[in-house]
């Protein structure tokens, strides 16, 4: 974890990388509570193994806050030790709320901050709190984020497209109606290298995992990563004339997913409708 901290910056100035990261983490894993009168608190509870991150939050906050530990029995362990960072200052809570950290339940309503902010540091905070970085059971690199928020899912999709060129069609899963956005292979390597840069504030275990991704190499004989094939106006006309993406995929020699995405872009006006031949 980085030792450097913002100096001479306003609390929660989201153009500062550490505060942007901290805010993303708090949006995903923090709990802002409001009580009668001016009372309330912000709290974050993590495994005691991650206590260093909470102490970093404490150092970054120019208001009194505390970090405490407790051991209790859970469904997963007879003796689980957790650490909790607690901040009660009304001024600090008001600032966080104004930045976009809601009171109460928030999983579906959080969204990227308005105005200027450090995008990759904010996204790393979200992934550290609600995402995963590592290797699949087959040994392939991956970066993923689980979220109930439309705005956050779109932010990750757009950021990764800008950074790596990879595109995703977002959809909620049927079981619990949340997004599980996953990137693998070389795309995951590029995304992890961008987010977990040297000296960044992050969970140490995820920064270590991100560093390991860079050593992966595509096994000999594995098909190379897909090279993007540009759409022509003639292909767009064929696509629109077909009854379904599956029929278009067969006619054009493309994937069903590619045809589905192109039809959606044509239908929403993101790309121009092909001219008549």
Image (spheres, rainbow, N blue to C red):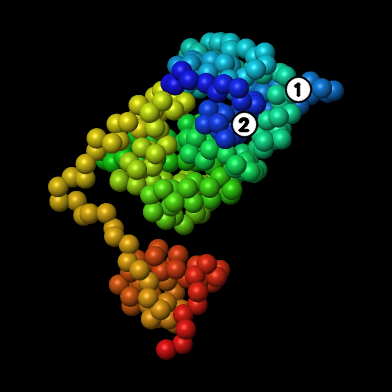
Q: Which mark is residue 16?
A: none
Toward the viewer: 71 or 65? 65
Q: Is residue 91 above or below residue 237?
A: above
Residue 260 sits in which quadrant?
A: bottom left
Toward the viewer: 182 or 58? 58
| Secondary-structure class at tag 1 | helix
- Residue 118, position as x, y percentages in the image: 53, 38
- Residue 48, position as x, y percentages in the image: 49, 15
Q: Is residue 188 above or below residue 125?
A: below
Instruction: Please tell me which residue is depicted at 33% across the width and 41% down the height of the picture.
Output: 189
Q: Residue furthest right?
A: 37
Instruction: Please tell me which residue is depicted at 70% across the width and 24% down the height of the picture.
Output: 92
Q: Is residue 148 above or below residue 47?
A: below
Q: Residue furthest left?
A: 220
The answer to whether one can see residue 24 in this image is no
Residue under pointer 1: 90
The answer to whether one can see residue 221 in this image is yes
- Look at the image and tell me in which quarter the N terminus lies: top left
| Secondary-structure class at tag 2 | loop
- Residue 254, position as x, y percentages in the image: 33, 69
Number of the front mark, 1 or 2: 2
Toward the viewer: 169 or 172? 169
Instruction: Please tell me which residue is depicted at 49% across the width and 70% down the height of the picture.
Output: 271
Q: Residues within 10 Å of mark 2 (few under 14, many from 20)?
A: some
Residue under pointer 2: 13
Instruction: Please tell me which residue is depicted at 44% across the width and 21% down the height of the picture.
Output: 2
- Residue 212, position as x, y percentages in the image: 29, 31
Name the N-terminal-most of marks 1 and 2: 2
């Amino acid at each position: 974890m980085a030792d450097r901290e913002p100096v001479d910056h306003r609390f929660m100035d989201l153009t500062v990388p550490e505060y942007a990261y901290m805010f993303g983490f708090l949006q995903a894993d923090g709990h802002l509570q409001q009580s009668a009168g001016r009372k309330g608190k912000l709290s974050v509870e993590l495994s005691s193994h991650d206590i260093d991150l909470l102490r970093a939050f404490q150092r970054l906050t120019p208001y009194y806050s505390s970090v405490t530990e407790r051991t209790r029995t859970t469904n997963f362990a007879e003796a689980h030790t957790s650490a909790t960072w607690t901040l009660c200052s009304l001024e600090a809570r008001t600032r966080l709320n104004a930045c976009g950290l809601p009171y109460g339940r928030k999983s579906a309503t959080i969204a990227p901050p308005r105005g200027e902010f450090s995008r990759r540091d904010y996204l790393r905070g979200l992934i550290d709190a609600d995402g995963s970085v590592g290797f699949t059971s087959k040994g392939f690199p991956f970066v993923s984020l689980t979220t109930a928020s439309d705005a956050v899912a779109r932010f990750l999709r757009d950021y990764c497209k800008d950074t790596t060129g990879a595109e995703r069609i977002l959809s909620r899963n049927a079981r619990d109606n949340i997004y599980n956005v996953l990137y693998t292979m070389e795309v995951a390597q590029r995304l992890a290298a961008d987010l977990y840069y040297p000296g960044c504030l992050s969970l140490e275990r995820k920064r270590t995992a991100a560093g390991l991704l860079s050593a992966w190499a595509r096994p000999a004989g594995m098909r190379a990563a897909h090279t993007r094939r540009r759409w022509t106006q003639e292909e767009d006309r064929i696509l629109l004339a077909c009854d379904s993406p599956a029929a278009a995929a067969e006619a054009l020699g493309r994937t069903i997913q590619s045809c589905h995405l192109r039809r959606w872009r044509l239908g929403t006006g993101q790309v121009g409708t092909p001219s008549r031949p």
